[in-house]
Every structure is written in C-alpha cells, then in structure tokens.
Amino acid sequence: MRNLLFSALLLAVAFESAFAQVLLQQTFGSGANAFTMDFVTIGNAGNTADSNGRGAVGYNYQMGKYEVSFDMYSKASSAGGLNLPVFSWGLWADRPTQPVYSGTFYNYARFVNWLNTSSGYAPAYKFSTQPTQVGYNAYEGFTAWNASDTGYSSSNPFRNTQAKYFIPTLDEWYKSAYYNPSTGTYFDFATGSNTVPTPVTSGTTAGTAVYGQDWRTPTADITNAGGLSPYGTMAQTGNLWEWTETDIRQVLSGVLYGDKSFVVGGEWDTPDWKVNPETKTADYLYGDNRTSDGIGLRVASTAVPEPSSLSLLVLGGVVRALGRRKRA
C-alpha cells in the first residue's frame, strides 16, 4: 500500500508538471499560420502597490513570457485577414523571431482581438468595423464599450470582460515586471534585482537587459532578450517599449490629453539614465494611432486553474481507487 501511495504521489507530481507546461502555452491559427505563445501565471492577488502607486492588482492573471514576434504578428494578420502593416526599419534584416516593433495601439488591439475570436472568445476591444467588412481599416474605428454591450465593465470600458486575451494595463504590466512575490515588495528592475542591469545585445544571463546599445544594432530575438523577472517574464526592461492598455484619461481624471496610452519598459537603444529606479518603467505617453519604431507588444490573459489544485484532485482520485482496491 505504501509503495502504491508513493507511486500515486509521483504520478500527481508528474501530472502537475506536465499540466503546467501545457497550460501555459497556447496555440493559435492552423497550418502554415500556426504559432504558439507562452504565458506565466501572475498570482498573489490583492498585492499592495509600490510607493509610486503602481502595481496593485486584485486578481490573478497571466502574462506573456515574451514579446510578440514578427512571426506571430504576420501569421495572425494572414489567418484573420487583418491587413496589419508590418514595417521594417531597414537598418538590419528583420528575423521572424525578433519582436514586432512598428505597430500602433489600434493595430495591436486588432491582433489581440483575433487571438480571442479565433479561440472562441469575445473580442477584447470594440471597433466599428471588422475584417472583411466594407470600410475596414486596421488603423481606425476604435471605441469604448458601453453599458448596452455584453461584457461591459464601468471599471474599464476599454476591455470586454468576456475576452481571454488583452493588452495589459499599466498596473498589470508593472506587477509582472517588478513585484517580488516572495517578499511582497518591488524590485527596481525587471530582472529581479535592485542593481542596474548589465547592458547586452542578447542572451539570457540573469541580471542582463537589452538596452544602451547603438540605435543601428538589431533588437534581440524574443527568447534571447535578457534575464527574467521574478515571475519569469523576459525583456520588460529593454529590447522594446511596450504598449499598455492604460489611457491617460483613466489616470488623470477629468484631464483630456486625447488618445494617448502609456508605453513602458525602454528599448534596445534606451540610454542608461532612462533605466533607473526613479521611473522603473521608463514610461511615457504616446498617441494610440501613431506608429514609431521601437514600440512592441506583450499579451496578457485571464487566469487559469492552479495546476496544484488539479494534481490534488488526481491524487485524491488515485487514493480513492486504492481504497476500493484494498476493500475488495
């Protein structure tokens, strides 16, 4: 009986490990347009904010481990008929594994919507026209959801609550980059450290980040862009600026700056003085419908069941089965 129970424990652990690997990777598209995205779980719901008021999130969610690549972006555009522009700066030969770096917020919102609709979920963002419809334009038609729309939330009228994939808010992005779940505090950099990262052109060594490079140097591939954050994300310091869903009008109540959102994280040629503990995110505001080289995207997702809970269910089932066997 003891040996059988030990075997059951090993089975449960193996199941948990395998399930976690599958659970955190999602496949989109099919055939020549198929691609996968890796996600890490951002737990510790209800954490406190940092001293600057950022980073508190009252729910668990998932964050893309990597930035979105050219390969992902172009395949989604092809599969969904999105007609998303894919610009090349021309200073280097772009690789499919590099992060896409020239989309507007609206372009990326279209991409995220396709991730949802192609997987059977509601679109995260509302547009007046859809791909294949007359008048469709990948740059236009963005608007907030309203109270008559299914999935509307007054706390965030830009994101539909029935969507699974979305562009992270400033707080969601900030927490996944800087929060230390072991201590309930925040690091200064998205490398799990308060020490200024070592600038590199690529690599995965802990404590490194892709920044401070010559502007003619290529960005690093999405899986080779510096050390990891405490939650396991890569390149939230350096490689590319990243769009967030947070609009300035949500932050400064009553002040209208137009359609502008926070972009965060810095890029490969961000100078040393911009990657510092004072700003952390090195954030600034940028027009939602403007295109600039150096702004990419990281996709977030709603939370999934914790693997440990499921492994306990499996173990419980095995133990019950062993009990029935003993009585027999």
Image: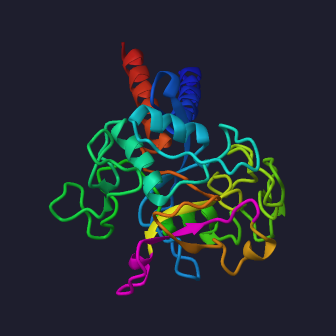
**Residue 240 at what x, y percent from top left?**
66, 58
317, 132: nearer the viewer? 132
- On the rendered image, what quadrant is the C terminus found in? top left
State the residue in front, 191 or 307: 191
Outermost residue toward the top in this view: 328
Q: Which residues are magenta?
A: 248-269
Q: Quadrant of residue 97?
A: top right
Q: Is residue 306 visible?
A: yes
- Placement of 94 over or under 45, stated as above or below: above
Residue 172 spot, x, y in % from top left: 50, 63
Residue 98's x, y, as percent? 68, 44
Relative to 278, residue 305 above or below: above
Residue at 42% over, 84% down: 252
x then y, percent, for residue 254: 35, 87
Q: Nearer the viewer, residue 271 or 23?
A: 271
Quadrant position of residue 247: bottom left
Q: Is residue 261 magenta?
A: yes
Query: In the shown orientation, is residue 316 left or right of residue 269?
Result: left
Q: Is residue 313 above or below residue 11?
A: below
Depth check: give the residue in front, 316 or 214. 214
Whether residue 239 is in magenta: the answer is no
Residue drawn at 71 percent across, 44 percent down: 221
Which residue is drawn at the image coordinates 45% and 57% (left, top)? 60
**In terms of image quadrants, where is residue 212?**
bottom right
The answer to whether residue 20 shows anywhere in this view is no
| 109 horizontally vs 15: left or right | left
